[in-house]
Image (cartoon, helix red, strand yellow):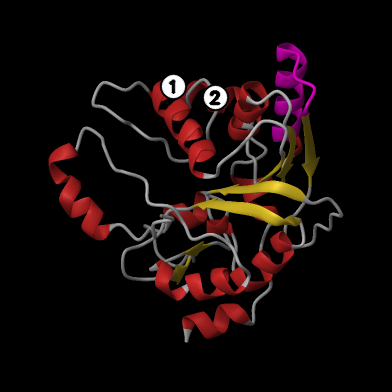
Amino acid sequence: MYISAIKEMPIAINTEKPKTQQHYELPTAFFELVLGRNIKYSSCYFPKDSSSLEEAEEAILALYCERANVEDGQSVLDVGCGWGSLSLYIARKYSNCKLTGLCNSKTQKAFIDDQCRKLGIQNVEIIVGDISTFEHEGTYDRVFSIEMFEHMKNYGELLKKIGSWMKEDSLLFVHYFCHKTFAYHFEDVRDDDWITRYFFSGGTMPSALQRISPTIMRYRYIPFLDIDIRSPILPHRPKLHEMTLFSKLF
């Protein structure tokens, strides 16, 4: 019933509240205090117990590029680019790549543009737009979406739109968090619904990818990727793998 319902919904709803009332237009100086050097506003990867936050940011950014088979000279679209951690990382590491980032925040764009000026980066273009209504004529070799799907509703329509920005042999890399068992709407109905109240108004908690992957495969996108879990909770790794909902590419 849940799956049937979201198929009738728009790509996203209530997109202005997270931007204007919650967090995306807060001063970047605040996020520089609480995030790592790359201002990565999403999950990190701690390959060993002693990893710092900056090392964990770099580790997962490198892993994204490895798993997505990024090569120098490609055109790359970063959908929901945030403060540009991935876009800037690729632009620095692959100087012949052309990066286009899509975000829904003028504050984020201003920060990324400023970083490009400071670092002498000239292969990044940031566009401000709402993914649910945004139209774009460009096509790309690689498309990334890092923890953006949680803000969406109708994945089928979203993937159709993203598909129109992909070349015939391009790849889509999606990273999102999900619940082991249940998919549900983020709704502010109880006192403890703080994640909806302050972060994900209008968003969705995805669940098992088996329910979503047929849609992905129908539009010929690669499945979501299994990231090896190594962290200070290494003894619990077998249990975490049992709970993991990611599919393996290979």
Percent position of residue 116, x then y: 74, 20
Percent position of residue 143, x then y: 65, 49
C-alpha distance separating marks 1 and 2:
7 Å
Residue at 25%, 59% in the rendered image: 243
Which residue carries the number 2 mark? Answer: 38
Amino acid identity at mark 2:
Asn
Which of 33 and 146 lies nearest the eye of the viewer?
A: 146
Residue 11 seen in the figure:
no
Percent position of residue 208, x then y: 38, 68
Which of 105 and 40 lies nearest the eye of the viewer?
A: 40
Q: Which element is circle 1 on?
A: helix
Residue at 65%, 65% in the rendered image: 159
Which residue carries the number 1 mark? Answer: 54
Q: From what the image shows, is residue 161 above or below residue 249? A: below
- Residue span colored magenta: 107-123
Residue at 63%, 38% in the rendered image: 82
Which of 116 and 200 lies nearest the eye of the viewer?
A: 116
The disc, 1 or 2, on the residue closer to the chain's N-terminal end is: 2
- The dominant secondary structure in magenta is helix
Residue 139 is marked as: none
Residue 43, image quadrant? top left
Amino acid identity at mark 1:
Glu
Q: Are marks 1 and 2 in contact (CB under 8 Å)?
A: yes
Q: Which element is circle 2 on?
A: loop
Is 134 contained in the magenta span?
A: no
Q: Classify 10 Å Cα crowding around label 2: few (below 14), some (14-19), many (20 and above).
A: some
Residue 32, image quadrant? top right
Q: From what the image shows, is residue 218 above or below residue 94? A: below
Q: Relative to 85, is 124 on the left or the right?
A: right
Q: Relative to 114, is 5 on the left or the right?
A: left
